[in-house]
Image: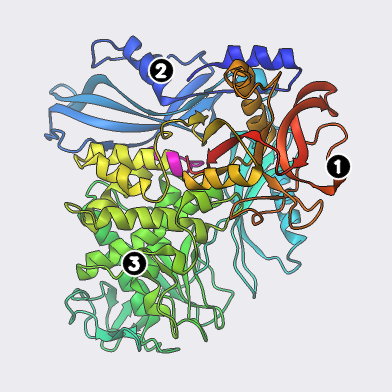
Amino acid sequence: MFRGLEISVLFVLLGLTVSAIEIVDREELQKRVIESCPDPPCDVWPEQLLRLPSNDYALLEIHREKVPNSDDRRKKGPVAVKIKYVETFKNIPVFGQNVVLEKVEVKDYDKRSKKVMATGGFRQFVYGTIAEGIEQDLESFIPELTVEEALKIAINNEKQQNTSLIVFEPKRDASLQIYMDEGGKVRLAWYLNYNVENSTEPSRPFYFIDALDGTILKHWESIGFYSMTGVPGGNVKTGQWKYGELRWAGRPLDVFQFSATCFYFNADARVTNCGNSWACSCASGPVATALCATGIVDAINGAYSPLHDSFYFTKAVYDMYRDWFSDFTLPTNYGAMRIRAHYGVNYQNAFWNGMCTTYGDGFTTFYPLAVADVVSHELGHAYTEATSGLIYAGQSGGMNEAFSDIAGEAFKYYLRGHNDWRLGHDIMKNGDALRYMMHPPIAPPSIQCARYYQGQGVHYSSGIYNKAFYILATTPGWTTKIAFGVFARANRLYWVSNSNFNSGSCGVIQAAWDLGHNTQDVADAFAQVGVFCKCPPGFVSRNSWSCYKFVRDVASWAEANEYCRAIGAKLAVIEDTSEENWVENYVTQRQSFFTDTHRVKDYPDFWIAGNDIARDYLWKWAHKGNLGGTTITTFDWLWGQPNNVHRNEHCLALKRGMHPTINTVRYGWNDDDCSLKKFYICEKTCY
């Protein structure tokens, strides 16, 4: 809901720092659309439809597609389309703020111009969020740093960890963005990435760098590790096959022939044979060639032809997307998807780096990685980058990795008509699989959102969406194809760069509704892994990030922790000042709700998840049980805390008292006796 003035005034009275930025949610946007367009369709600008506050705010179209079952006659007739926009301010994109609108376009053939003309208007559908108040939070929208200076800051930061850094094509995708940092403050930032290649491990770092002062705001690693007939493919585990002669590999390799020589490229795929070299360029590597009669001879490490496999499976993935989603194909940077086969020496990984897919030949653990689900997995990253742009960190990173896992299973279903739900099974020499979609805790251990914690690796947190997909795909009335279509549509239209588990599930539900599928089945699948599009009864939401339950019954810290876990949540983890400000504001506005019970006077204390039970002054968030979790590195202690009175104050509470940095009375952290009875806050972090 839109409540900026009320909250801002309260924070000013309390002497707190507050951002002027406001995120306008779907509910508020829906009200605006209905008021702006009471009798649809309405022929207005999208900015008018959403009543953006000034001409500095605009919506830039980034994707459109036809609404399923919409009339699409060639020359005239109504065509309903969904259009995805990114919000801009002063022509600068606002990171993570996207909306989807639905428009009816009537096509008429104009005899004079001999062109098909489109008219029409918007319907009352809206999905997404926008930001307002940007101009109040940021004084300058002109960068002080050039993109080259920002890039130098990023590269110097990487060199501190890697002295042998080699940068290839560094100025890829650099753009100026309006970015909200983790404290909710608006920043003008350069958003950039570049490729690093050396003899140890390829890398593709992403950075947000403040365009005014050069501060590194956020950074993360985006690379996730892991008609010729009769030519060979497969490995000793899958068995050898001949392309053009097997049911699911029945199509020949579609290559370009000149005389007796075949060149491994077509409209979809172009492969380079790196010959186990590390110095192998995505952009300028030569096309692999071979005699058409025999194909390339490149058997290695138990695989019969990794080059044939990478080439064939890449084109087959393109065919899958075309067959299943006829109005959308995978993105490419240079026409056909560029592939590097036989990359590096004993290289046991595969990756997408924004320009090409790359496959190593494995070593002692893996066979060569150019197998069906791995190829589709890496192309899934390309699909995500071109659609939602999910950043490869945090919850959005878990979604990014999960979508690629899901794409891998979808491709196996496309080829074979069934699934084994074992990710990476075909490359494992001694094990069974890298990950298991039907039971993610086997490897690695992650299903329920209550087990998620900030900083958890994306290959772990991916298990949440993987399991939800498995549940949905095996629900009566569903198939892998249907479920993948829903997830892929959500990725195209409803997910945004910084989506979280909750908002992502809302997008999947909306996609299911678009396609005429049972939305309750989708909600139930996510509920089984602890993800909810809306907060469960008794919980309240904050900016579509988390669900909180403020419990009026007093309990010890251990009792509070156990209760939260029992309801599929955890004791609240206060990760930044904006979250703490929100909690304080919520409690302050509802003081009587708490003080009318248990004879509590003034402002009550609340248990949260921190403790140093295992070791004095080594404070940790209790993510898994009473003692486990991540070490707390940023603190917000009240004056004189922690003091560990009588050496028995080992649990963390929010308490109202004198705050040292702003010299005023407000909520802050206090160490206290774990056996004391206090109110407490439960949190569902996957909302």
25 or 676, nearer to the observer: 676
Between label 2 and label 1, give the one nearer the viewer: 1
Question: How far apart are the alpha carbons under marks 1 and 3?
Answer: 64 Å
Residue type, label 1: Val
- Residue 335 visible in the displayed image: no
Residue shown at 77% from the left, 60% from the top: 160
Q: Position of residue 146 (x, y in %)?
A: 70, 39
Residue shown at 71% from the left, 37% from the top: 653
Q: Quadrant of residue 204?
A: bottom right
Q: Position of residue 603 (x, y in %)?
A: 70, 21
Residue type, label 2: Leu
Which stretch appears magenta? 492-502
Q: Is residue 117 magenta?
A: no
Residue shown at 76% from the left, 67% from the top: 163
Location of mark 1 (residue): 645
| Circle 3 crowding by C-alpha within 10 Å: few under 14, some 14–19, many from 20 | many
Label 1 sits on a secondary structure element that is helix
Q: Position of residue 254 (x, y in %)?
A: 25, 72
Label 2 sits on a secondary structure element that is loop
Location of mark 2 (residue): 50
Look at the picture and state if 157 lies above or below 659.
below
